[in-house]
Amino acid sequence: MNTSPADTELLRAERDGPILHLRLNRPLKRNAVNDGLILAIDRAFSALSADVRCVLLSGEGQHFCAGLDLSELSERGVYEGVLHSRMWHATLDKLQYAPVPVVAVLHGAVIGGGLEIAAAAHIRVAERSAYYGLPEGQRGIFVGGGGSMRLPRLMGVSRMGDMMLTGRVFDAEEGQQVGLSNYLVGEGEGLARGLALAQKICGNAPLSNFSVIQALPRIAEMAPSEGLFVESLVAAIAQGDPAAKDRIRAFLEGRAAKVAKQ
Ligand code: 1HE
């Protein structure tokens, strides 16, 4: 593992009430992910304090993330390569299966491992400068951070294969069309939109948020019969929570917001 004394600064953490804002912080290297940075992300998600209700993830400088730090790759043999990929898997599983939702704000390069990190988040907000690439094919390598599992679920195997085989880069508009981002916003507007979405998420009952991020992707992978059964269990658990009872009573008594066009 390559770590340096400056690793604590590789990921900046700031609290804004119930929101934890994590910033990839290697702007001079375009936030390329060295071992120190992936381990810092791992630590952050291993030690989320209980009063955090949502995480905002962004990148410092002109780019979200240039992917794997290629300068470390040349030192690895085959076995080290497998272990390294498994380390990314463990970290990004912690991110995807965090107890609270993660909103990623994307701008500039969202490349290789950077796109794999973004794909593990629950909501992606892209600024117009965002562009997406998987140059693994050109670099003679393969995705190793869970991209082959998560990215086809967002944009399809065929599009991902095209990006890897031909080096095709999607711009922000195309990324929005193919499902890489949930929201497309103007330049410099990503953090504000990400924060607004995080605040909305914080307003939900914690058990509902937990059920969405823990149960939904798992149920979607199940056979229909098993999935429907698990859905019934999760629905019953969620509606049995006192927070659900309070919220439903508030609606019936005219004290809760109606659903409205936005
Ligand atoms: C890096 C990296 C990196 C920048 N590893 N050092 N990812 C890639 O193949 C993308 C490689 N990077 C780029 O194509 C470009 O750097 C960018 C399009 C992202 C940005 O371009 P630009 O002109 O703003 O910056 P730059 O001048 O290219 O880079 C600034 C510095 O960052 C420079 O170092 P310096 O010491 O010369 O200043 C670059 O070498 C360094 N840098 N990107 C190492 N990726 C879990 S497996 C995932 C597998 C992958 O992610 S493969 C994709 C890898």
Image: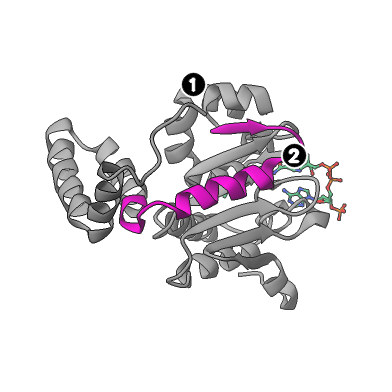
195 in the magenta segment: yes
Where is mark 1, residue-wise? 158
Label drawn at residue 86: none
* Residue 109, percent from left and from top: 72, 39
Query: Camera-side residue: 140 or 144?
Result: 144
Q: Residue 158: in sight, yes or no? A: yes
Asked if the stretch drawn in magenta spans residue 180, the answer is no
Label 1 element class:
helix
Q: Which percent across, then down, holds residue 189? A: 72, 40
Q: Is residue 216 left or right of residue 16?
A: left
**How was this image coloured?**
one colour
Residue located 80% across and 51% down the image: 61
The part of the image, by quadrant, that contains residue 242 is bottom left
Q: Amino acid at mark 1?
A: Ser
Query: For disc 2, does the CB lie below 8 Å from ligand 1?
Result: yes
Q: Is residue 47 above or below residue 230?
A: below
Q: Is residue 126 above or below residue 194?
A: above
Mark earlier in primary sequence (2, 1): 2
Q: Quadrant of the N terminus?
A: bottom right
Q: Position of residue 91 (x, y in %)?
A: 48, 60
Which residues lie in the magenta part? 181-209
- State the CA–CA distance, disc 2 to disc 1: 24 Å
Determine if residue 181 is in view. no
Residue at the (67%, 47%) spot, across then down: 191
Which residue is denoted by mark 2 in the rendering?
108
Residue at 22 percent across and 58 percent down: it is 241
Relative to 210, 73 lies left or right: right
Q: Residues within 10 Å of mark 1 (few under 14, many from 20)?
A: few
